Image (cartoon, helix red, strand yellow):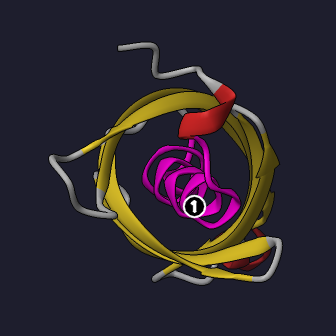
Amino acid sequence: MNIFAPSDRKPLVRSARLAALLCAGALLGGCAVGVGVGIPVGPFSIGVGLGSGGVSAGVSTGVGPVGVGVGVNQRGAVSAGAGVGTSTPIGNSNARVGVGVGTSTTIYDPDRHRR
């Protein structure tokens, strides 16, 4: 099975996969491990993730296997990230499972201003 085949890609599923990827990895800061879920809304996805940095929420978009996003964690720190990933369907359902890697940077940290 070729998971990169264009016929296997649906725009909304791709957006959901990218949101999960970005919320789980990029929005949790640095090299974090996490898990997330995204809900497609037009060309964007709104997602929630949980990882070593706590809970994060964000918005992402992507084209093909590449995605970008912005999110905020439970402390109020805002991060921007980019990632690349792939996914495959789970059985005959619309659900997918995927893997990816990403990087992020903190663009606002409320604790930084208190020091």
Q: Residue at x 68, y 30 (%)?
A: 6
What type is the residue that disc 1 sits on? Ala
Compared to residue 61, the image places residue 114 above or below, namely: below
Compared to residue 56, the image places residue 30 above or below, namely: above
Q: Is residue 69 visible?
A: yes
> Residue 64 location, x and y as percent?
76, 35
Compared to residue 13, the image places residue 41 above or below, namely: below
Task: Answer with left or right where residue 22 lies relative to residue 66.
Answer: left
Q: Residue at x 66, y 74 (%)?
A: 45
> Residue 46 location, x and y as percent?
61, 80
Q: Residue at x 70, y 58 (%)?
A: 11
Compared to residue 65, the image places residue 1 above or below, namely: above
Name the element at disc 1: helix
Nearer to me, 103 or 78: 103
Task: Answer with left or right where residue 37 lies relative to residue 21.
Answer: left
Q: Is residue 78 visible?
A: no
> Residue 101 location, x and y as percent?
53, 25
Q: Give the quarter of the image for residue 89.
A: top left
Nearer to me, 97 or 80: 97
Task: Answer with left or right where residue 22 lies relative to residue 95.
Answer: right
Task: Answer with left or right where residue 9 lies relative to residue 75.
Answer: right
Nearer to me, 73 or 5: 5
Task: Please tell me whether the stretch drawn in magenta is mainly helix, strand or loop.
Answer: helix
Q: Which residues are magenta?
A: 9-29
Q: Give the quarter of the image for residue 5.
A: top right
Q: Badge 1: few (under 14), some or many (20 or more) residues near its Cα, within 10 Å?
A: many
Residue 16 belongs to magenta span = yes
Q: Which residue is mark 1?
A: 19
Task: Specify the quadrant that holds the N terminus.
Answer: top left
